[in-house]
Amino acid sequence: MLKGNKTYIIIILILFGCLIFFQINKPAPFSWKPTYSKIDKIPFGGYLLFEHLDVLFPNKQVVTQTKPTYNVLKGDTANGVNYIFITSRFQPGKLDAKKLMHFASKGNRVFIAANKIRGKLADTLNVKVADVYAYDDYYEVLEEDSSTFNEFGEYQYWFSDSTEANFTNAKLAADSNYFYDMAMRHFHFTSYDSLNTTVLGKDHLNNANFIKVEVGEGAIYLHTLPRVFSNYYIAHPVNHTYAFKALSYLPVADVYWDEYYKKDRKSMKSASPMRFILSNGPLTFAFYLLIGALLLYMIFNGKRKQRIIPVITPLENTSLKFVDIISSLYYNKEDHINIIHKKITYFLEYIRGSFNIKTNTFDEDFVRRISIRSGVDQASVQNLFKYIDHLRQKQWASQGELMQLNQMMEEFKRNSKR
């Protein structure tokens, strides 16, 4: 009887093995978990910000740190370095906090963006963070120890809220607040040492969410909305400027990028079916028995057959197709002034990022500083920005003016030292 059902048994074993194989190797589901890691391209990962650090800190070294601050800074004599932490909760141990304070006091800068800032560092800086959870027109203040976290260290209802943010510095502040509508909560500071603290940013409820604490010869910057630095908002056409402006408070210097204090590392363990099977005795025995049976079948009854290898058509580069469609629309519409305004916006962002110079006014001092730092002749720089200022005042432009602007910008970049 067993011999007669041999074919069916083999088929069942093969199907069972295939099921386990595909379960183990199937692509991970799309995740909205906030990791802020430089390798994660998910919405709340940190890939885009990390890739733009060379623009924010041109010609400076970026070093990824994967150890606690005590191990990183032990014996470190660096001066004028920026240490960037972006995570959901920042709660370093006593020794780590002490080392970080000493690091800042020696003239370095520490930038911490976290919803929850706790432990020895928070006590030393005398800061406290609370949250406002909004639903309808009612706002409920939640102290930092009163909320329930899920297995990923996040609020179970984090996805249902939004918030706004802006800078207190009139030169950096936008005309209207930056609006964040995806998984944002009103985390803010409820107390801080006003003698050593400068408020750099607030939310729409006038609560401080971005502060600078003077520490010796350096400073520690604290921000309560780490998600504004995530991929989702760095890719946003407007909100990305907020993140870059916030980081512009740091000097152009070498950067330590933290990967150690990201999400709770316990929650990052693999939860694959294979781990579950191997952690259970009977399932482990059944799994190895299945593998052994398949091997015996392959040795004694298997017959190798070469299947036809299908031709796989390469995936179409939809990004280039999208760019081609958009450019064709602009070209056919002859909306040259719109393209001119966009090119000017990106060019001024390039000037700010490459030369660390504000672009509010194009006066003689501005032209002189650009010429010195870029190495481009001052007359050429003056002609370029005079032409930019001229085009910004126009409501219509010709194709020739667009081409002239593009030629002048490209010539400036070619001749620039940076």
Image (tube, rainbow, N blue to C red):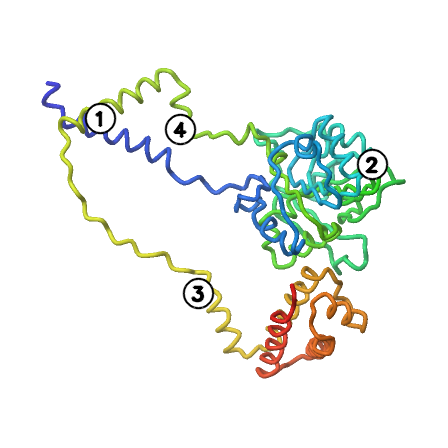
For the residues labelled 3 and 2, the Cα–Cα distance comes to 51 Å
Tell which circle, 4 or 1, labels the residue nearer the N-terminal end. 4
Q: Which residue is mark 2?
A: 191
**Under tag 2, what secondary structure?**
strand
Amino acid type for the residue under numbered disc 3: Lys
Residue 144 occupies quadrant:
top right
Q: Nearer the viewer, residue 385 or 119?
A: 385
Q: Name above or below for residue 397 compared with residue 417.
A: below
* Residue matched to label 3: 321
Position of residue 143 measured from the top left corner of the image (x, y, whole percent): 75, 31
Residue 328: give x, y in percent of width and height: 48, 73
Please give the residue where the numbered disc 1 appears in the rendered image: 295
| In front: label 2 or label 1 | 1
Label 2 to label 1: alpha-carbon separation? 66 Å
Badge 4 amino acid = Pro
Q: Could you tell which of marks 2 and 1 lies nearer the N-terminus?
A: 2
